[in-house]
Amino acid sequence: MKKTLALALAFLLVALSVAGCSKPATDNGTTPEPSNGGESPTEGFEIALITDKGNIDDKSFNQGAWEGVIAFAEAENITHQYIKPEEASDAGYLAAIDLAVTGGAKVIVTPGFLFEVPIYEAQTRYPEVKFILLDGAPRTADYATFETKENVASVMYSEEQSGYLAGYAAVMEGMTNLGFMGGMAVPAVQAFGYGYLQGAEDAAEELGMGDGAIKVTYHYTGNFEENDTNKATARTMFQEGVEVIFAAGGAVGKSVMSAASEADAKVIGVDVDQRYDSETVITSATKGLAASVISVLESIYKTNSWDTYAGKTTYFNASNDGVGLPTKVIGDDAADAFDRFETFNKAKYDEILAKLADGSIEVIRKIDVADAKGNATADELTSQLNLAKVAVTTR
Amino acid sequence: MANNNDITHSKKYNIKNITKSSAFSSFTAALMAIFLGMIFGFIIMLIAAPEKAVAGFRFVLLGGLKRIGDVFYFATPIIMTGLSVGFAFKMGLFNIGASGQYTMGMFFALYVGFMMDLPSGIHWIVAILAGILGGMIWGFIPGVFKALLNVNEVITSIMFNYIGMYLVDMMIQTNETMYISTMARTKYLPQSVQIPSLGIQGSNVNLGIIFAILIGIGLYMVLQKTTFGYELKATGYNKFAAEYAGMRVKTNIIITMVIAGGLAGLGGALAILAPSAIAGSSMTYEPINRIAAAGFNGIAVALLGSSHPIGIIFASIFISHIQRGGTLASLVGYKPEIIDVVIAVIIYFSAFAMIMNAGLARLLMKLVKHDDKVPNNTKGAE
Amino acid sequence: MENYIVEMLNITKKFPGIIANDNITLRLKKGEIHALLGENGAGKSTLMSVLFGLYRPEIGEIRKNGEIVKINNPNDANDLGIGMVHQHFKLVDIFTVLENIILGVEPNTMGFIQKKDARKKVVELSEKYGLRVDPDNLIENITVGMQQRVEILKMLYRDNEILIFDEPTAVLTPQEIKELLQIMKGFAEEGKSILFITHKLNEIMEVADRCTVLRKGKYIGTVDIKDSSKEELSRMMVGRDISFTVQKEKREPGEVVLSVRNLTVQSKNNKNNAVKNVSFDVRAGEIVCLAGIDGNGQTEFVHALTGLQKSTSGNINLMGNDITNASIRQRSINGMSHIPEDRHKHGLVLDYKLEENLVLQRYWEPEFQKGGFIKFDSVRKYSEGLIDKFDIRSGQGPITIARSMSGGNQQKAIIAREIDKKHELLVAVQPTRGLDVGAIEYVHKQLVQRRDEGKAVFLVSLELDEVMNVSDRILVIYEGEIVGELDPKKITVQELGLYMSGAKRDNIKENNNGE
């Protein structure tokens, strides 16, 4: 009992002594004493980013979006800060948003669909704060209500264009036997796949190839995992003669890269530039996370055109750097991001990108699929995407 | 005869002194330990960003006071894993497997939450009990290995951290009722299985903290007041003497590990069943092949609390307080990673400094004794 | 004053609750054996620890050859030529004898140990003083006596000239004691000065030149041994007259309480049988002593008897119940009390309070618990009663931590606990080991009192005096076998010694015992 008491006393005393010694420190004038007892310090930040469960250097949404924030805020000399939620839950994300608002944030960037539910709550709670939600749209937890208020910009990406560029590049490179391994058949993954087929078709057309000259093996893994099944599937596809697999399914890519390095074959990455993960990655169908964040921030701070994004979902595409293949190697400005291609190059890429940007090429994003899980049949793909040069087999 | 009288006199005089000085020193040691940790934390903040250090450190120290609800909410699972580690330690067992037991507790609670349809009044209670059961199973196995085969519990429980984590991740990923693979996490738990909130604005603090504190007090009673606690501590201090006194040492080892596992499992259940401030939402489990940090924080609070149940409660609340305040330090511009380092330094420095408690106590005793040297001596002179 | 090599003047050292040394002065002449005599807890070890630099006194000064010296740690002591053989040896079990001797003063070139020179010196020393050791054997494999020789060699290796022996004979067999005393005399003749801590008066009378007596932390006096007597020394030590013979009336033994038949027990260290086919009975109202030189299977036998170890074959019967495979608790309930050989390892939970230790065998009884909750009031009352009745002295009474108590009082606590518990058979294993005369007298009285109350007492002892004085019947164990059943009134100590060393044996027939 004595020990208990002593311990309790100790903690109490620590608390007291801390309270005691922090006073003189502030009295010294090292920091300005806020009038309301330290609730909001004078030094706040205007733009805040909340990370999701990953770290700020996750080579994915957190990092991409934060790079956009930094690039814009440093150029414009705006205070900025990222905040790590204390808990990877909806409530934890919402609490982090609360904290950012306490810290004076006027614009809050939330990368990833995990923020859909928290933003739905926050948009009502903080009507004066602007939210940039990447890859998602505010909704309730039970999917019953989708509502994007005027203070929220929901940003989505035209994955089909990114996929288109990947397919186009592969065929232009001279490959005729392609593979696609998506994760689950969710809209973003489907769009990548459909675009990929259309890009291959157009490239074959441009090269004057005959009908059915390009073979594409099309597959959804049904998950987003790195596992032995996915690796085995990739290995089988490579053994059947597939030269390159477009791996559009998160960690599925790791399984594919592992199989590719064994089979000495190639991989096309997804979302961010994955060339740093494996030598087998020739290019990646990326989303322009940083570019999109910068665009929205510009609308707020520079062009005073928030209305263009407010209260709705905006797709970022080739016209606004929203999608594309990587054109730069991080840390080496002189390096050629297309160095893993032999024939395809930056000039050809710019050419086709321009066509996507000006709308002269339109890429189909969505087709009707009978299967409840969204797995399209070869027939559905061929007919609805108007494929001729490309012969699709699903597995 | 005169001599005898002298001795009884000086004895009495000294008893007073010791009770005073030993209580004083243990309290001072705790204080010094934490204080040292804070100084080091502050130095790191100074190095990272000198101009913000004072303001930032104020948040670390006092920020938690403004977030009492969250302090208690985040303290809940650490209290449980801390009690788990500390309780086993009383028996001389180092339960490094609290993480695995915690994860198992989460899984069992999730399983009841998703797979069983029970009335809302009892659903969460059943889920909590299931969590305890899950942790118990995961404590039982290393306990049996230790008791019957004399395999060091540190080794088995480390292994069972990994086995438990991979097993749970696998079972969740293959269960379509529980898992949404597009979001790579479990679905939202039904409202009926979430622990009732205490209703503090802006915090998820729930009945769990009440349970945790009550269980801590209960454990204290068990250790101090019961024959089981008496046997347990005796075994921890000297297992040969325990055996000599006819205590069933092996059975007690297993029981202790089962209880320790159950405590950690309860921690997992309380964490995953916490209510959400957002309607329809809940906590989710993400199978990302990572060992739960709560188990290791448990070791830290058990050290800081000297394995004493009440000490562990205070240590957990203290650590949660520092963490909550630390989060607020990002308001003055500290990067979350720097804050993590500062908090880790404070926690671990405090915990490790507590180990030096004994040495510090001795030092203080010496100082105290030098003061009363003169009167005692004159009394004892011939 | 001129030829004092070491002087400890007015030393005062305090511990929580106790003044261990109260203004003590001790002067050691060059070339003498100076005994330091006192009961357990009189402050002998503390005083020597002060000299050896393990404790620093609050008051007082130490002089060497007339000059004041500061001894802050054992290294300082060593630099002054002071060496110490501790009561509990400070050896590394898994190192060899040689490695232990040179530990801390390893001769090395560039960090590599040069064992060759060291070995030469050790061999020379061991031959010169007759300290037989095998330099390459591991400590854990050699006998206690040999370990002690290693400790002595450690001092000699460091060229120490002031040698402290802290109760060196407590752990030795009679033969080894004789050898040790001889070696000590040799050291003194060579001009080394010896401080000899003991409470065995015979040894003091045999070797010491002078003797300083302490009692309860105070200095009582210093006497020349040639002008003194055992009686005078013991009176100085305990403050009253002590009887060296155990007073007991003749009694007729009653019913058989313990019956052991053909008991065989495997050794803990190897596959051999440490106890071989042992059979005997112990009856109510008699003290049966198992005598023998240490390491002849006594430990294993007692462990099998008390349930700490399983027996290989044979059976044990207590009060008509077969307890061969019973649990320890069951044996206890059936009436066995056990004063264990190693009071620190088995007898006490040293970090528990005295009162908690006093109920170690009984905490589960309804008197001390209800519904699993310990009745602390009853425990306190009970232990206060025992402390009073058995005169257990400690700094803080029932709440004293057992570790902080003196060895004699720790033993008193164990005896109090085991005797006060309901029992028919008292197994007492070396109950007077390391105790002073006062305490020994006390323990012997207790044993005889049990016998007179009609309890069976089974005593295991290595001390010849004890065996001869206390027991009603002697069983001699040699290499795991009972080689003789003797009547202490009819044999001489010399004869007993022959049995113990295996030089003589009777054929003991089964079922012949006690008839």
Image (cartoon, coloured by chain):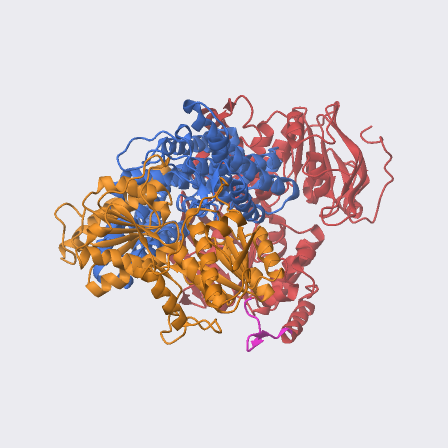
Chain colours: A orange, B blue, C red
Percent across and percent down for residue A266 are 53, 65
The residue that appears at 54% across and 21% down in the rendered structure is C366
**Which residue is nearer to you in this view: C88 or C171?**
C88
Q: In the image, which residues are magenta?
A: C104-115
Q: Nearer the viewer, residue C507 or A114?
A: A114
| Residue C239 can be seen in this image | no
Residue C360 lies in quadrant: top right
Vertical arrangement, residue C234 with respect to residue C376, above or below: below
Report whether residue C129 is seen: yes
Say if the magenta span includes residue C113. yes
Give the farthest residue toward the left.
Answer: A35
> Is residue B108 magenta-colored?
no
The residue located at (62%, 66%) in the rendering is C99
Q: Position of residue B241 (x, y in %)?
A: 58, 39
Left or right side of B307 for B168: right
The quadrant of the picture occupied by the N terminus of chain A is top left
Q: Is residue A352 above or below residue A41?
A: below
**Residue A95 in the figure: left or right of residue C359:** left
| Percent coordinates x, y for residue B124 in the rendering | 43, 28
